[in-house]
Amino acid sequence: MIYFTSDLHFCHNKPFLYEPRGFNSIEEHDETVIKNWNSVITNDDEVYILGDLMLNDNENGIKKLQQLKGKIHIVLGNHDSSVRQDIYKVLFNEVSYATMIKIDKQHYFLTHFPSLCANYDDKPYHNHIINLSRSYPQKR
């Protein structure tokens, strides 16, 4: 199976991050993300993380990332500093700013930031490239 996610923000100890996600602390957030992840993902699954894996505490962030199941591919985000990029290159097989994958006959361009990938005229759908990127929460 192939999965896509983004913005795990392990160790990002700011209430504006974990409280809207329904947690009382970053520790509770991180533990729940890891538990939920590992209840779904197997070691044979491919997982593409579209940026912003961790922030602040790199040492603790590494420990959390190492607990995640699956064959993980990293697409870098705005919080993935050069130090974190070097860490990711040791932990994971693929680290890039963007990557293209093909599933069946469909191409997907994976980025942290939305990108325009095609001229969406009336050509058949299978000729289009779909951009998967992180999404921004809607303000209410």
Image (cartoon, grey):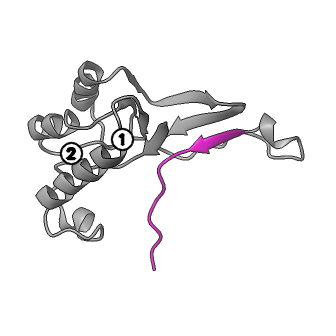
Q: Earlier in the sequence, mark 2 or mark 1?
A: 1
Q: Which residue is mark 2?
A: 55
Q: Position of residue 117 (x, y in %)?
A: 68, 39
**Is 60 contained in the magenta span?**
no
Image height check: is 140 above or below 74?
Answer: below
Q: Residue furthest bottom?
A: 140
Q: Which residue is mark 1?
A: 41
Q: Amino acid at mark 1?
A: Ile
Image height check: is 26 above or below 127?
Answer: below
* Quarter assignment of residue 90: top left
**Mark 2 near mark 1, Cβ–Cβ under 8 Å?**
no
Closest to the observer: 1 or 10?
1
**Residue 68 placement, left or right of 51:** left
Which image quarter holds the C terminus?
bottom left
**Residue 66 placement, left or right of 36:** left
Closest to the observer: 64 or 99?
64
**Is 135 contained in the magenta span?**
yes
Q: Position of residue 11 (x, y in %)?
A: 16, 49
Q: Nearer the viewer, mark 2 or mark 1?
A: 1
Q: Which residues are magenta?
A: 129-140
- Please tell me how crowded label 2 is: few (under 14), some (14-19), or many (20+) other residues with Cα within 10 Å: some
Say which residue appears at 55% left-offset and 47% top-offset. Answer: 114
Q: Amino acid at mark 2?
A: Leu
Say which residue appears at 31% left-offset and 24% top-offset. Answer: 92
* Quarter assignment of residue 75: top left
Q: Taking the image as drawn, is residue 12 in sight?
A: no
Say which residue appears at 43% left-offset and 36% top-offset. Answer: 48
